Every structure is written in structure tokens, then in C-alpha cells.
Image: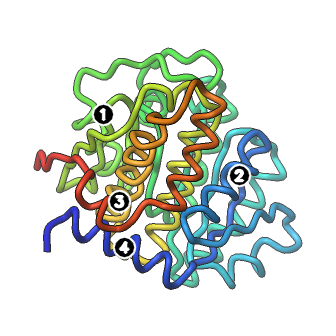
Amino acid sequence: MTLGEKCAEILVRIRQKRPLVHHITNIVVANDNANTMLALGALPVMAYAREEVEEMVTGAEALVLNLGTPTEDIIKSALLAGKKANALGIPVILDPVGAGATRFRKEAALLLLERVRVTIVRGNAAEACALLGRPSRERGVESKAEAENQALLAREVALKFGVTAAITGAVDYVSDGKRIVAVHNGHPLLTRVTGTGCMATSLCGAFAAVESDALLASLGALGFLGVCAERAIRDSQGPGSFRMRLFDVMYSLSEDDFARNLSFEVLQ
């Protein structure tokens, strides 16, 4: 079975098993994260309160921690949920949104990486550079980093933090420290819709919920979003119709079409 066929088989499992993905996410994208899960075939739950996050994650198959609008309370909830997920063997996906924009965001992401066993880190090149302690240019949470070699950047993040790193951009790079894969699917209009990076993180959660190989899960998740974007743009007039069509394609894309259109390159 090829890697593309394996990714399509993960999609089959998601739609059959309908895994519950617990999100501690940000206020900007919570609705789109939930709709992404439903369109894919997974089940979303958004729970933030410290009084319930441990109990909620007990019933989930994956945990997504998104630092898009961080507060002290959210970070404490993320730590509680993350530790509980670790105890239960549930994969944890971290999105260090805007890690290079403020010290608070960077320190929150590093704290979670220190105290929680994270499975996948999904971010852009600027966020990855921030986690590694390198200068990165940020405006809000929009990436301005131009890494000379984002494949090596993904591998470095993976090795430093013991995670699978999914670094998204014009080309996406996924590495578990040993293997590196470039994902070529996508469309520039993804950058003109709020929260598509966070959608990618949620998709990583759903794919990891049913697939223990985190690199394969990340490849499938990023490839799925990219293929859906390529389909959605055909009937779109701009960002609004593109966003709507993106959910439609996530819902209707067949496993065979996904496998046929997935474009990736194994670099190592």
C-alpha cells in the first residue's frame, strides 16, 4: 500500500469511527474548527473550564491545544487536559499560534511542551523559529518568516521537542526527526481566510485519533486540507465562497479522489 493509499485509508477510518476530538481552542476559530470536524466525519467538543477538562478528555480520542487567544486560565486548563491525555495515551496536538508575537505566547507554548507529552506540533515557520529561540518576523499571527530550508526546520523542531512537526506554508513539511515529507497540495486563498491553519491543526487531531503513526497522520491531515482547497477554488469567487465550498468538499471528497490527488514528496 502506498503512502497515499494509507492516508486515504485513515480517512475511511475517521468516517467509520467518528472520533471525538476535544478542543481547547481560540475564540476566533472555534466554530470553524467544529465545522471542520463535522464535515470530515469526526466529532468536536469545545471545553475550557478547569472543572471539567480532565473529565471531558477522558471520553475523547485526541486533544487539540490551540493558543490563538491565550489566557492564564486557558493555559492552566490546557495543562490539566494535556496531562490527563498523556495518562490515557490520547494524542495531543499543539498549535503555538503567534508564538513569536509576544513573550506570553512563546512561554505558554514552551511550558506545554515541557510539561505535556505532545504528539504533533502544527505551526508555520515563524512559530517554529520562535520555539527554537530564533528571530522571526511576525505581524499579529501572520507568518513573515522565510526559512531557508523549512524541511530542516521541521526536523529540528521534531528532534528538540520529541514530537512530529507539521510546518505549513506554500509547501508543507512534516518530520518526526527521522523522516521528512513535503506536501504540495493547497491554494494561496487559504491564507485569505481566518483560521485555515487552525483547521489544519484540528485535522491533525482527527487523523491522529485513529492513526498511531503521527507523521502519517500529519501527512494525511495536511494533504486532505490541501486537496479540498484545490477542489473548493473551482467554484469560488473569493474568500467567502471559498470558505463555504471548503466545508462542502471536506464533506463530499471520496477516499479514492483523495488518494489520487494527494501530492507529496518523501525527502528523507
Mark 2 — residue? 25
Asked which secondary structure carries label 3, the reply is helix
Name the residue beneath numbered marker 4. Answer: 10
Which of the two residues, 167 or 16, is positioned nearer the viewer here? 16
Q: Which residue is mark 3?
A: 220
Return the mark for residue 179: none
Instruction: Point out the tag, 4 or 2, that comes first from the N-terminus.
Output: 4
Q: Position of residue 229 (x, y in %)?
A: 45, 41
Find disc 1 in the rendering and name its residue. 171
CA gap between label 4 and label 3 equals: 8 Å
Q: Earlier in the sequence, mark 1 or mark 3?
A: 1
Measuring from the top left, give residue 231's x and y in whole percent. 42, 43
Q: Residue at position x 40%, y 38% from top?
A: 168
Total count of labels = 4
Q: Residues within 10 Å of mark 4 (few under 14, many from 20)?
A: many
Determine the CA span between mark 1 and mark 4.
22 Å
Looking at the picture, does residue 124 appear above or below residue 222? above
Cα gap from disc 1 to disc 2, whole angstroms: 25 Å
Q: Is residue 145 above or below residue 210?
A: above
Q: Amino acid at mark 3?
A: Gly
Crowd tier of the residue under label 1, counting other residues whose Cα lies within 10 Å: few below 14, some 14–19, many 20 or above: some
Q: Earlier in the sequence, mark 2 or mark 3?
A: 2
Asked if labels 3 and 4 touch by Cβ distance under 8 angstroms, the answer is yes
Horizontal arrangement in the rendering, residue 177 relative to residue 113 (left or right): left
Q: Which amino acid does the dot numbered 4 rest on?
A: Ile
Q: Secondary structure at mark 1?
A: loop
Image x and y of residue 109, in percent? 59, 45
